[in-house]
Image (spheres, rainbow, N blue to C red):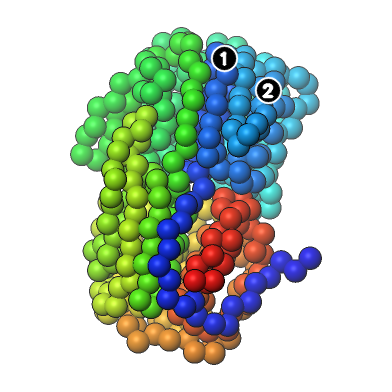
């Protein structure tokens, strides 16, 4: 089966309304908490990607009953600490760092040893950032030099902890929050700013959580051993996935797009703020609040005049998944764009900072890159014409693939991009939506 895509023609102008699949972060968090609830929880518009299917398969192995019926995902929760721990259980997280890291928080109470494995890409990523705080609860871990596979040996009565999260990692914070549910007492988390989906879900479920918002960090307190009520949830569309179409529209000729019902949680719209500051025309309409999350329709027009930016690092955590495609806008902008304190990008599915620079260099854009920063020397007249570009060996990182597709369609060139199946992890309908725009 051919797992490559070839693009040798720019996309024609388009004016379309599209719908993006459900938010991946919310889909995984909803499933994990629904598995711990008392009673039946139902979700519509849950993302049906490999990451979510891996999540559901892991929960089934732990005793949760899950089925899809008429487009809905139904989870019969086992109750807090209700997982069934059989001997020699292996949970395969596939490519999902969110799943692998967050589920460890729920397993601090495991009464049997459980092995967590993942694919080649996930097995290269750091897990000490998760195991070290979870060890404070009393759990024990055996790792492969801080990486997968990991064996967790839980403790019957985890103890509450005080934890400082200083990386701006929502995964680290959320893993500790989930572990705190299993303790008798008060867990306190001082967390650098990052996406707050877990906090909003906790509040929606009326779990005993208090949050004090400070300028540079949040102070979160959680009391454990409280029952979790069932949660019915219509998952809003994913802003990270939407950003690829925001940029495609921005860089395409005389085009417009409307993206319906997108999660514009303030902790997730760093990419929108960055793109607006570069001159991109992005408008939110029909704004509403749903279970604590801010939802809107997004309108975008093509933008001819783009300007470089000295990007504030305060926006990094809220745009961490979108920087690769933001770099494309910087490549077409007037002047030099500078992005710093981005070492966290290299903790993703691939070393994305290196790949961002490599893609731009293949396009003829000059960059200066360090281990945590990149300068991009923009070229407003950038046109790749028939320049041949081959993209391969990028650890099947879905965001590398989608960024290259956007570049090929908007900037031209003759592209061969490997591993198109990588999008199955997070955005399986990406190419289908792309083709709907190409047929305009």
The answer for how far apart the CA atoms under marks 2 and 1 are is 11 Å
Mark 2 highlights which residue? Answer: 65
Q: Is residue 235 above or below residue 205?
A: below
Residue 105: x %, y % from top left: 54, 27
Kindly indicate the quadrant of the structure image that contains residue 326: bottom left
Q: Measuring 40% from the left and 35% from the top, which residue is drawn there?
A: 197
Which of the two labelled residues, at mark 2 and mark 1, occupies the earlier sequence position? 1
Query: How dense is the environment of label 1, judged by Cα within 10 Å: few (below 14), some, or many (20 and up)?
Result: some
Mark 1 highlights which residue? Answer: 39
Query: How dense is the environment of label 2, judged by Cα within 10 Å: few (below 14), some, or many (20 and up)?
Result: some
Kindly indicate the quadrant of the structure image that contains residue 392: bottom right
Kindly indicate the quadrant of the structure image that contains residue 149: top right
Residue closest to the eye, 110 or 82: 82
Residue closest to the eye, 118 or 341: 118
Q: Say whether residue 291 is left or right of residue 61.
A: left
Q: Measuring 48% from the left and 15% from the top, which residue is drawn there?
A: 229
Return the residue found at the far bottom: 386
Q: Say whether residue 78 is left or right of residue 405.
A: right
Residue 89: x %, y % from top left: 75, 27
User: Disc 1 on helix, strand or loop?
Assistant: strand
Q: Say whether residue 346 is left or right of residue 223.
A: right
């Amino acid at each position: 089966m051919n797992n490559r895509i070839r693009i040798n023609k720019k996309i024609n102008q388009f004016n379309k309304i599209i719908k993006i699949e459900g938010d991946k972060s919310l889909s995984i968090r909803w499933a994990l908490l629904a598995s711990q609830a008392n009673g039946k929880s139902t979700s519509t518009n849950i993302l049906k990607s490999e990451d979510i299917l891996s999540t559901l398969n892991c929960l089934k192995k732990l005793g949760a009953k899950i089925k899809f019926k008429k487009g809905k995902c139904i989870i019969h929760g086992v109750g807090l600490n209700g997982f069934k721990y059989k001997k020699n259980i292996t949970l395969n997280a596939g490519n999902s760092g969110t799943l692998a890291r967050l589920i460890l928080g729920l397993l601090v109470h495991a009464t049997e040893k459980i092995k967590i494995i993942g694919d080649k890409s996930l097995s290269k990523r750091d897990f000490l950032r998760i195991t070290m705080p979870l060890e404070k609860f009393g759990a024990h871990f055996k790792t492969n030099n801080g990486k997968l596979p990991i064996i967790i040996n839980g403790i019957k009565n985890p103890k509450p902890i005080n934890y400082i999260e200083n990386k701006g990692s929502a995964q680290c914070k959320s893993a500790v929050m989930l572990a705190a549910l299993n303790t008798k007492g008060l867990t306190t988390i001082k967390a650098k700013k990052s996406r707050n989906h877990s906090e909003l879900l906790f509040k929606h479920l009326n779990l005993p959580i208090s949050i004090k918002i400070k300028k540079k960090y949040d102070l979160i307190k959680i009391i454990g051993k409280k029952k979790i009520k069932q949660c019915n949830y219509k998952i809003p569309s994913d802003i990270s996935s939407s950003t690829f179409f925001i940029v495609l529209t921005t860089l395409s000729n005389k085009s417009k797009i409307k993206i319906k019902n997108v999660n514009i949680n303030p902790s997730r719209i760093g990419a929108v703020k960055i793109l607006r500051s570069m001159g991109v025309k992005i408008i939110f309409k029909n704004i509403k609040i749903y279970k604590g999350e801010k939802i809107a329709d997004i309108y975008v027009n093509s933008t001819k005049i783009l300007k470089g930016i000295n990007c504030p690092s305060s926006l990094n955590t809220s745009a961490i998944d979108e920087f690769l495609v933001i770099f494309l806008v910087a490549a077409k902008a007037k002047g030099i764009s500078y992005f710093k304190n981005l070492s966290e990008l290299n903790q993703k599915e691939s070393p994305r900072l290196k790949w961002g620079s490599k893609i731009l260099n293949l396009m003829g854009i000059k960059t200066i890159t360090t281990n945590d920063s990149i300068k991009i020397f923009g070229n407003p007249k950038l046109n790749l014409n028939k320049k041949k570009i081959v993209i391969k060996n990028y650890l099947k990182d879905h965001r590398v693939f989608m960024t290259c597709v956007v570049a090929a369609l908007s900037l031209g060139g003759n592209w061969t991009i490997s591993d198109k199946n990588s999008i199955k992890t997070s955005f399986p309908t990406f190419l289908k939506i792309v083709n709907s725009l190409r047929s305009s």
